[in-house]
Image: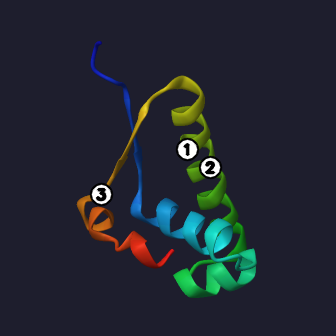
Amino acid sequence: MGELSVISLADDELEALKLVDMDGLSHQDAANELGVSRQTLGNIVAAGRQKVASALINGFALELSSDNQNVDHTTQ
């Protein structure tokens, strides 16, 4: 099997997706948490979702920054 194509998910995209999709925060609350406008948060979430969907549908690997690879997933 050949090497997978890779899509990089930026730190802010991952954090925005976590806050909105996993933690259930509104866009306004997530924007406040990240210190950005609601519109900027919406753009970040849209970009992150597009990358995740593309990786799932096209069989690409999702690459996360090294900071995100040490997250403890046992409490989720």
The reply to whether discs 1 and 2 touch (Cβ–Cβ < 8 Å) is yes
> Please, what is the three-letter code of the amino acid marked with disc 1?
Val
Query: Disc 1 to disc 3, how far (Cα)?
Result: 15 Å
Going 51% across and 34% down the picture, which residue do you hit? 55
Q: Does 6 sit left or right of 15 as displayed?
A: left
The residue labelled by disc 3 is 65
Whichever of callouts 3 and 2 sits on the residue coming sooner in the sequence is: 2
Going 41% across and 70% down the picture, which residue do you hit? 73
* Residue 57 in the image: above or below residue 12: above
Q: Does 59 sit left or right of 17 as displayed?
A: left
Going 34% across and 71% down the picture, which residue do you hit? 71
- Could you say whether the residue bearing mark 3 is in a helix, strand or loop? loop
Query: Disc 3 to disc 2, how far (Cα)?
Result: 17 Å
- Could you say whether the residue bearing mark 1 is in a helix, strand or loop? helix
Disc 1 crowd, CA 10 A, few/some/many (<14, 14-19, 20+): many
Residue 65 image offset from top left, x and y in percent? 30, 57
Query: Disc 1 to disc 2, how far (Cα)?
Result: 5 Å
Residue 20 image offset from top left, x and y in percent? 66, 71
What number of labels is visible?
A: 3
The residue labelled by disc 2 is 49
The residue labelled by disc 1 is 52
* Residue 2 in the image: above or below residue 14: above
> Please, what is the three-letter code of the amino acid marked with disc 2?
Arg
Residue 6 image offset from top left, x and y in percent? 36, 33
